[in-house]
Amino acid sequence: MKSVSDKDLRIGVFVCECGTNIAASVDCDEATEFSKKLPGVVFAVKNKYTCSEPGQQEIKKAIVEHKLNKVVIASCTPRMHEPTFRQCVSEAGLNPYLMEMANIREHCSWVHVTDKKKATDKAKDIIKAAVARTRNLEPQTELEVPVTQSALVIGGGVAGMQAALDLADAGYPVHLVEKSPTLGGKMAQLDKVYPSMD
């Protein structure tokens, strides 16, 4: 796929209320209106729950109807729903790596619970940064790489030897590498060892 030039940018911004998780502290209407004025943004909308099935359907519909080629989802942490939204935009025919998330729940509403103006201003800044980042997003392809089912353990001290034994017990071939001529590390240098003091 070829990259999108600045003049061809068609960014969609989806601001999630997350019930009251975000909406109680962030003015989502103000954040949505702010998003509409950002360079390259051709569509912005507020959702109650963007991760829900109706919310995802709205994203898919907007991608097709507004010919969006980049998407920003202002919601919760990517750790929670990034795979959900990547799958969503992919099902709408957009490369999943042309989607950016703006975390306005953990970074705004949850840390500025008692200050709606501060939470809203910060949310607008985070959305603005996410929209700016989308300018540099390129379509990506996921590759499958073969993995050698063996382990290399560096260091033949007590921890290294135990790791090598555990991996071998699990059925993996193990290569144990130690720079000195003997195993045991610091343990081999002690003449008495707790608990038996042998």
Image: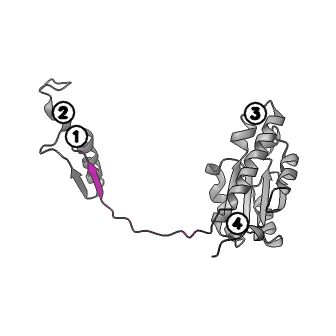
* Residue bearing the label numbered 2: 187
The earlier-in-sequence mark between 1 and 2 is: 1
The earlier-in-sequence mark between 4 and 1 is: 4
* Residue bearing the label numbered 4: 89
The amino acid at mark 4 is Val
User: Is 117 rendered above or below residue 10?
Assistant: above
The earlier-in-sequence mark between 1 and 3 is: 3
Left or right, 83 with respect to 126, comes to left
The earlier-in-sequence mark between 2 and 4 is: 4
Element marked by disc 1: loop
The amino acid at mark 1 is Gly
Q: Is residue 154 magenta?
A: yes
Mark 1 vs 2: CB contact within 8 A:
yes
Task: State the quadrant of the N terminus.
Answer: bottom right
* Residue bearing the label numbered 1: 157
Answer with the quarter of the image where residue 174 lies: bottom left
Q: In the rendered structure, which segment of residues is drawn in magenta?
A: 140-157
